[in-house]
Image: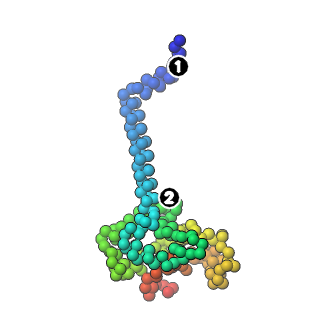
Amino acid sequence: MKLPIPEFLKRYWHFLTRPLALALWIILAFGFFAGIIFWGGFNTMMEMSNTEAFCTSCHEMRDNVFEEMKTTIHYSNRSGVRASCPDCHVPHEWTHKIVRKVQASKELWGKITGKIDTPRKFEEHRLQMAMREWDRMKKNDSRECRNCHNFDSMDFSLQSKRAAHMHSTALASGELTCIDCHKGIAHKLPDMSGVPGW
């Protein structure tokens, strides 16, 4: 015995089998799968470029600032918590991360043109590069520092008197942000002559 097919299913089947509708479904399916492949590839590339191995793949970073960082508490310390390049230089939030990646593309231009390809050239531009990074961190209230250092979790009794005072007043009020006092915490300071406050 053959079951009767409801009328709405017949109309729907007829719609799906018309040539125009079929082409539309093919285009939609292709777009859907192409979108998944693009998004997966894009995300994979974003995460690959967000590793310390990627950051230190060019000798300008590996031989200069990465070697300096190895001597700091951010690289090796009693607790074993280690910050990598992206922890300090790339925001965790997706939108901010995309903006930072676009900004970082000019660093690739410096690599391609050889602007900082020798230690001498790197030192010539160190202050300019550092100031650009400090300015970025000042404007975003040291967002990357706060990924690990939570103001609400600070125990002022374990800090020096000066640090406890600065953290509980200037940092708490928003008058200052981390980078105002902690320049050179992970990298050698450039020649600071002529820089206000130094």
Q: In this rendering, does residue 17 appear at all?
A: yes
Give the percent coordinates (x, y) of residue 42. 42, 54
Q: Amino acid at mark 1?
A: Pro
The foreground one among 71 and 18 is 71
Residue, far left: 113
Q: Quadrant of residue 16?
A: top left
Residue, far top: 1
Q: Are marks 1 and 2 in contact (CB under 8 Å)?
A: no
Instruction: Kindly identify which residue carries mark 1.
Output: 6
Q: Quadrant of residue 115?
A: bottom left
> Relative to 157, is 1 above or below?
above
Residue drawn 40% across the image and 26% down it? 17
Q: Amino acid at mark 2?
A: Trp
Give the percent coordinates (x, y) of residue 178. 56, 75
Q: Quadrant of residue 193?
A: bottom left
The circle drawn on residue 63 is: none
Q: Is residue 19 left or right of residue 51?
A: left
Spatial CA distance of label 1 from label 2 is 48 Å
The circle drawn on residue 94 is: 2
> Relative to 8, is 175 above or below?
below
The foreground one among 38 and 60 is 60
Packing grade of label 1 (10 A; few <14, some 14-19, many >=20) is few
Give the percent coordinates (x, y) of residue 19. 36, 28
Q: In this rendering, does residue 99 appear at all?
A: no
Residue drawn 44% across the image and 50% down it? 40
Q: Earlier in the sequence, mark 1 or mark 2?
A: 1
Packing grade of label 2 (10 A; few <14, some 14-19, many >=20) is few
- Numbered circles on residues, count: 2
Residue drawn 63% across the image and 71% down it? 151
Give the percent coordinates (x, y) of residue 29. 42, 38
